[in-house]
Image: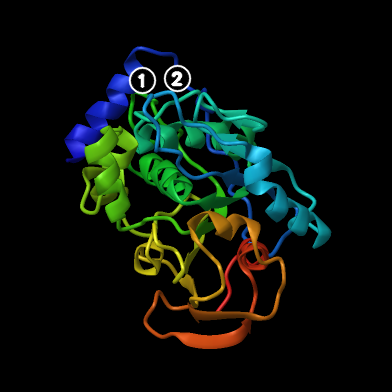
């Protein structure tokens, strides 16, 4: 499978110019610390239910406006970068003009170059927030750099500095909805998100950038598209599952919960070995801020 995925990467790179240029040497690794002044990337989820391969598209302002507004009010001063991957995406800071057949691995490669070209090669680290399939794109970016960054073809950057990642309802172990989508539409992004897919096997567990990366995986019991088990199904130090009955369906998580209290949840800080429950936890948007601020928290 690794040879197949490497082949896809090479094929994608062969016919086009590389998405960025390699630095001569690695910039000094930035320190890990608690900070609200790093750049934050926001990566939206999939938009797969279309009859046309170019039908996918998202409005980045609508997707992330609530979260960004709440974070600014809490003192975030760094760049906010909305990164899209469909031709139909609008109001994004930057995007790759992909379609519903753009493999998630390739989207990860494109995201890796964007982060490298704008931040990593200058010795600057970033944080990332991602919803749904967007979390798999981030996972692919880090995994691809770790696996192939030293390759002579320079298809991937040599290194990345991503300090924190927070994901909202990302199907880390796949989703049965993607299996149905594959049968109905045959889009490759659907195929990549099927349980047991080649992509999910390739993408690995708890991938780490060259700076080290602290992952927080967030799921919701109300989500009927990505189960809470799938949303927290990758190795990661921090995991949160919101209790049912709080109107946190799949598309709602990036838009709700700037409050720091009043939400029912279970959480773990040891990769799910032990769990604690509370009825007074932070909402999803509030939790994003905590996850990105602390470079490591117990």
Q: Which mark is residue 18?
A: 2
* Mark 1 surroundings: few (<14), some (14-19) or many (≥20) residues within 10 A: some
Q: Secondary structure at mark 1?
A: helix
The answer to whether residue 40 is seen in the rendering is: no
Residue sitting at 46 percent across and 33 percent down? 157
Residue 72 location (% of width, % of height): 79, 55
Residue 169 location (% of width, % of height): 46, 59
Q: Secondary structure at mark 2?
A: loop
Q: For this rendering, which residue is in front, 286 or 21?
A: 286
- What kind of colouring is applied to the model shown? rainbow
Where residue 189 sits, quadrant-wise, is top left
The answer to whether residue 260 is seen in the rendering is: yes
Residue 229 location (% of width, % of height): 35, 68
Q: Are marks 1 and 2 in contact (CB under 8 Å)?
A: yes
Residue sitting at 26 percent across and 37 percent down? 184
Where residue 181 sits, quadrant-wise, is top left
Residue 221 location (% of width, % of height): 44, 71
Residue sitting at 45 percent across and 19 percent down? 18
Image position of 285 (left or right of 241): right
Image position of 190 (left or right of 49): left
Q: Which residue is mark 1?
A: 13
């Amino acid at each position: 499978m690794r040879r197949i995925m490497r082949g896809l990467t090479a094929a994608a790179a062969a016919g086009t110019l590389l998405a960025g240029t390699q630095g001569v040497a690695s910039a000094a690794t930035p320190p890990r610390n608690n900070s609200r002044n790093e750049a934050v990337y926001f990566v939206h989820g999939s938009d797969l239910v279309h009859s046309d391969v170019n039908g996918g598209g998202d409005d980045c302002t609508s997707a992330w406006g609530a979260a960004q507004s709440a974070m600014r009010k809490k003192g975030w001063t760094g760049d906010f970068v909305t990164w899209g991957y469909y031709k139909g995406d609008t109001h994004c800071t930057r995007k790759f003009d992909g379609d519903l057949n753009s493999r998630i691995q390739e989207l990860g490669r494109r995201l890796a170059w964007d982060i490298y070209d704008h931040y990593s090669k200058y010795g600057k680290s970033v944080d990332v927030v991602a919803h749904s399939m967007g979390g798999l794109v981030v996972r692919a970016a880090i995994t691809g750099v770790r696996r192939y960054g030293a390759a002579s073809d320079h298809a991937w950057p040599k290194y990345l500095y991503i300090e924190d990642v927070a994901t909202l309802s990302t199907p880390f172990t796949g989703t049965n909805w993607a299996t149905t989508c594959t049968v109905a539409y045959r889009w490759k992004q659907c195929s990549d998100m099927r349980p047991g897919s080649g992509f999910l096997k390739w993408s690995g567990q708890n991938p780490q950038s060259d700076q080290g990366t602290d992952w927080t995986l967030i799921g919701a019991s109300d989500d009927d598209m990505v189960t809470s088990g799938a949303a927290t199904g990758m190795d990661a130090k921090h995991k949160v599952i919101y209790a049912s009955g709080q109107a946190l369906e799949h598309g709602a998580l990036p838009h709700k919960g700037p409050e720091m209290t009043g939400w029912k949840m279970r959480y773990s800080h040891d990769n799910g070995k032990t769990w604690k429950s509370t009825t007074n936890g932070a909402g999803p948007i509030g939790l994003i801020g905590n996850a990105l601020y602390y470079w490591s928290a117990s």
